[in-house]
Amino acid sequence: MIEEITASESLRKCSECGGEIIETSFEFICKECGLVYEKHYKESSYIFSDNPIKGNLSKQYVSIGERTDFVGGLGTFIDYENSKYLKDKSGRLLSPNEQKLYRRLKKNYAQFLRIKNHETEYRVFNILNKICVYLNLNRNIRNNAAYMYKKIIRKEQKVINNISLIAFCIFYAARKQFHNAPITINEISNAFQNFGHRVNPRLILRDAIEYKIHLSKSSTPHKSEDYIVRLLNEVINHKDLENRLLKKGLNWSKQKYHNELSKKCREILKKLSSWHRGGRNPFILTGAIIYLANKLIARENS
């Protein structure tokens, strides 16, 4: 990464009050009087160069106008794409001369020119953003999925299917994050199908076998504890839960039942060693433990 620091390294004391100069909010300022000296430019987005030579660190750079999960340039669009008349911030029409000026600027910086030669990547990242919102995935997962996609595209001359590839990247990125518990392949494929894309678990697994060699091999196996919060939320949010509690004779609120069930599940998990868990699917084992915890609570309060 390139870091440009315009302030002199020898500048340590304020020329006005003699106070210490510190860096805050990307600026060098005096700690005592607040006088701003220089800006500290630092960009964190990591972008691959187009150079085919691998492992050349001098060709890996940071560009202000590029982001990991976005295709386009600096700035924003001028008005809507097909708008006929341009208006100012107050909603008033611009003068004829300004209309002519801004239409020309809009034409020269149209969306087509921004994404030229990157149409596939632009479409894939639009899909990525939609899926991440639909599955409530955080920004780190989205950025990591985009990073993995770019890394694979850079090393592969041709991929089988870009849509299934980004689905695999989402799955792989989500597995490395402890956010909403690991997302299953079926959930990802269902999300893509809801948006009209023909992606199924078989295609995601195919891409995993084909392209995983380009990604980091270090992966921590997930345990049943990682799924507890998510599966308990599904139980608590079930529409028939209150009726079931009344039927069992438990006059508890949802919150109290959630706390008791969570406590009981974690007590059971603490008693299960790795030897007892065997090699069972942690997701299925978590479901079985929740069922057992519910039975134990019913027996204790009967």
Image (spheres, rainbow, N blue to C red):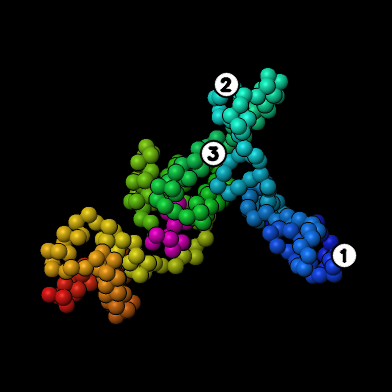
The quadrant the N terminus occupies is bottom right
Give 13 or 165, whichever is nearer the viewer.
13
User: Residue 79's x, y, as percent?
Assistant: 59, 30
- Is residue 204 left or right of 35 when viewed as pictured? left
| Residue marked by disc 2 | 84
Closer to the N terminus: mark 1 or mark 2? 1
Residue located at (46% from left, 65% from top): 219
Foreground mark, 2 or 3?
A: 2
Give 299 or 199, whichever is nearer the viewer.
299
Within 10 Å of disc 1 (Cα), the crowding (few <14, some 14-19, many 20+) is few
Within 10 Å of disc 2 (Cα), the crowding (few <14, some 14-19, many 20+) is few
| Residue marked by disc 3 | 122
User: Residue 7's x, y, as percent?
Assistant: 81, 59
Asked if the residue at tag 2 contacts the one at tag 1, i.e. Cβ–Cβ closer than 8 Å, the answer is no
Amino acid under disc 2? Lys
Amino acid under disc 1? Ser
SS at mark 2? loop
User: Residue 17's x, y, as percent?
Assistant: 85, 68
Closer to the N terminus: mark 1 or mark 3? 1
| Residue marked by disc 1 | 15
Q: CA distance from mark 1 to mark 2?
A: 54 Å
Within 10 Å of disc 3 (Cα), the crowding (few <14, some 14-19, many 20+) is some
- The magenta stretch is 170-181
Does the stretch in magenta take in 69?
no
